[in-house]
């Protein structure tokens, strides 16, 4: 069976940036992550879905 699942990640931050949307954008573009397969689940594709923020 092949399907798509969404994993949410809670991230607590401290920043000197004035606009929180700038911090979100920076995290979205500079985050490295690894989601690996298990004995019963093969991970075939991953991506960070960008949050569309208003500036």
Image (cartoon, rainbow, N blue to C red):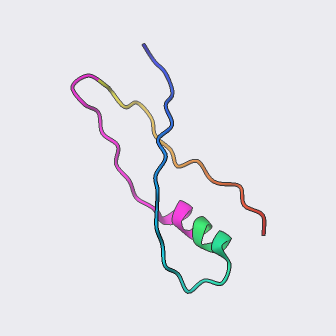
The image quarter containing residue 19 is: bottom right
Above or below — where is 36 with respect to 30?
above
**Predominant SS along the magenta part:** loop
Q: Is residue 28 left or right of residue 18?
A: left
Instruction: Farthest residue to the left: give it.
Output: 39
Image x and y of residue 40, in percent: 26, 22
Asked whether residue 37 is drawn in magenta, I would say yes
Q: Residue, x 52% and y 49% (percent of image)?
A: 48
> Which of the two residues, 19 or 49, is positioned nearer the viewer here?
19
Question: Where, quadrant-wise, is the N terminus in this rendering?
Answer: top left
Image x and y of residue 49, in percent: 58, 47
Asked whether residue 30 is drawn in magenta, I would say yes
Q: Is residue 30 left or right of residue 17?
A: left
Q: Is residue 23 left or right of residue 3?
A: right
Above or below — where is 39 with respect to 34?
above
Above or below — where is 33 with respect to 45?
below
Q: Which residues are magenta?
A: 26-40
> Which of the two residues, 7 or 30, is positioned nearer the viewer here?
7
Q: How many marks?
A: 0
Q: Residue, x 38% and y 53% (percent of image)?
A: 33
Image x and y of residue 44, in percent: 40, 30
Instruction: Farthest residue to the top: give it.
Output: 1
Image x and y of residue 55, in percent: 78, 70
Above or below — where is 48 with respect to 45?
below
Instruction: Farthest residue to the bottom: give it.
Output: 16
């Amino acid at each position: 069976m092949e399907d798509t699942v969404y994993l949410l990640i809670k991230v607590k931050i401290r920043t000197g940036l004035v606009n929180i949307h700038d911090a979100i954008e920076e995290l979205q573009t500079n985050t490295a992550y690894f989601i690996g397969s298990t004995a019963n689940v093969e991970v075939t594709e991953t991506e960070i879905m960008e949050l569309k923020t208003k500036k």
